[in-house]
Image: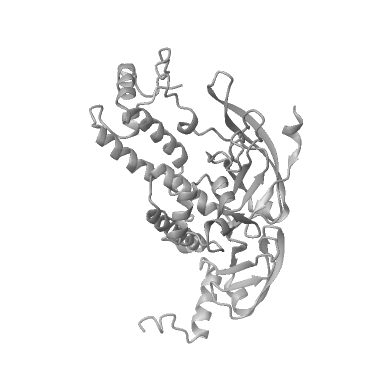
Amino acid sequence: MKESETACLQGQVIDERVELTFVELCRISGASEEELTLWVAEGALDPIGAYPREWRFSGAVLRRVAIAQRLSRDLMINPPGIALALDLLDEIGALRARTRAIPAAHRESGPPAGPA
Amino acid sequence: MEYKDYYEVLGLARDATQDDIKRAYRKLARKYHPDVSKHQDAEANFKEVGQAYEVLKDPEKRAAYDRLGAGWHGGEAFRPQPNWDEGFEFSGAGAPPDFDDYLASIFAAGRARPDGSLNAGRDHHAKLVVDLEDAYRGAQRVISLSVPVVDPQGHVRLQPRTLNVSIPKGIRAGQYIRLAGQGGAGHGDGAPGDLYLEIVFRDHPRFQVDDRDVTVDLPVAPWEAALGATVTTPTPDGEVAVTVPGNSPSGRRLRLKGKGIPGDPPGNLYVKLNIVLPPADSERSKAAYDTMRQSFDFDPRAHFYG
């Protein structure tokens, strides 16, 4: 077996402590600079800095941008649609989390069938 | 390779118009898109629908497929005539690679690096499903993925690859692990791209996770909630004792500070009390409920109607 297959890889965690530039975020997510600029203009993303070349994004937005890129590529959704889809996905995520938090006993309509 | 009825995949008759095909594809692509759909086989369905559309959207490919497809039925072994699909084999963008159970999906999201090195490899993306316990303790995971590679003849093939990846303690859903140099190979002297693993937690039967906070539903007896008690609760990091204060209503959330996903700051663990009533299934238990009825001046519906 090759060494590359057995050595344990230590990756870098991309989270809110990591700052990504405009160019980095484009490269990682696969989004074009034009797309990313339009998503920011729609308010779907909120970078620090006035101009694209100064923009700094939190590493925590990477997932959002990756989803935006895939939806835009696969379903041909335009920037206002992307902004709406991301907001709705956030809302659905929150609702699903709340549904999961309801105890199983409260979700069932009746008591479990027991021995007669 | 099995013959797939692309018309059936898109839910169409063989005489469907190009507009019908486009409409059916768009609708199913939205329905099964892995970022939107919670459908169990969303990923596979999305791929299949994409493959079908790839062929049927192009009148020439469609005609070739129709000629070849006559006489074949879904599920039968499929031996294509030489070169029938030349020029539009299901490679590259059309056919995302396969995964083992840790890898739900991979999306080639590559672009040439804008730093001038056009030979640089692409960045690859994959999902990595981990257990909540891994986030508490850290873990190692062996992942295998198939990566499309271009051979010297210019054909795209899927090459299996195994990686041993360290899952750092404190990892949370939605974060990424960047493995530098593990993405697509560079061309010529170009550097390889990076591999980005998106972390997803496997659904846990006991624990719900919200960012760094974890909630567990803890069943308690009515007398434990009423009189107070010290009870044992599971956490992703083993059992701990919690004090249930007296007069606790059902649904009360007790906070165990810092017992959520480790980090700086660590998350909290919330123990949500779920009062479970013992069944009145014997003379003694019925008598106990009757004693309760007589001991309380209690109307649960006192404020029910406002």
> Residue B110: x percent and y percent?
54, 39
Quadrant of the rendered image containing residue B143: top right
Q: Looking at the picture, how far across and down is residue B243, in whole percent?
A: 68, 74
**Total number of numbered labels?**
0
Q: How is the image coloured?
A: one colour
Q: Nearer the viewer, residue B57 or A114?
A: B57
**Left or right: B130 in relation to B98:** right
Query: In the displayed structure, does residue B136 sit left or right of residue B225?
Result: right
Image-quadrant location for residue B128: top right
In the rendered view, would you say B224 is above or below B68? below
Q: Quadrant of residue A91?
A: bottom left
* Quadrant in which the C terminus of chain B appears: bottom left
Q: Nearest the camera: B239 or B104?
A: B104
Which residue is the extreme one toward the bottom?
Answer: B297
Height in image: A20 above or below B253? above
Please state the horizontal and vertical placement of residue B223, each as a whole percent of the image. Answer: 60, 75
In the rendering, at what x and y percent does residue A63 appear?
Answer: 54, 52
Residue B158 visible in the snapshot: yes
Give the residue at x 52% y 44%.
Answer: A30
Residue B200 seen by the camera = no
Given residues B17 and A83, the one toward you in this image is A83
Q: Is residue B293 above or below residue A115?
A: below
Instruction: Please tell me which residue is depicted at 61% across the width and 44% down the height of the picture.
Output: B196
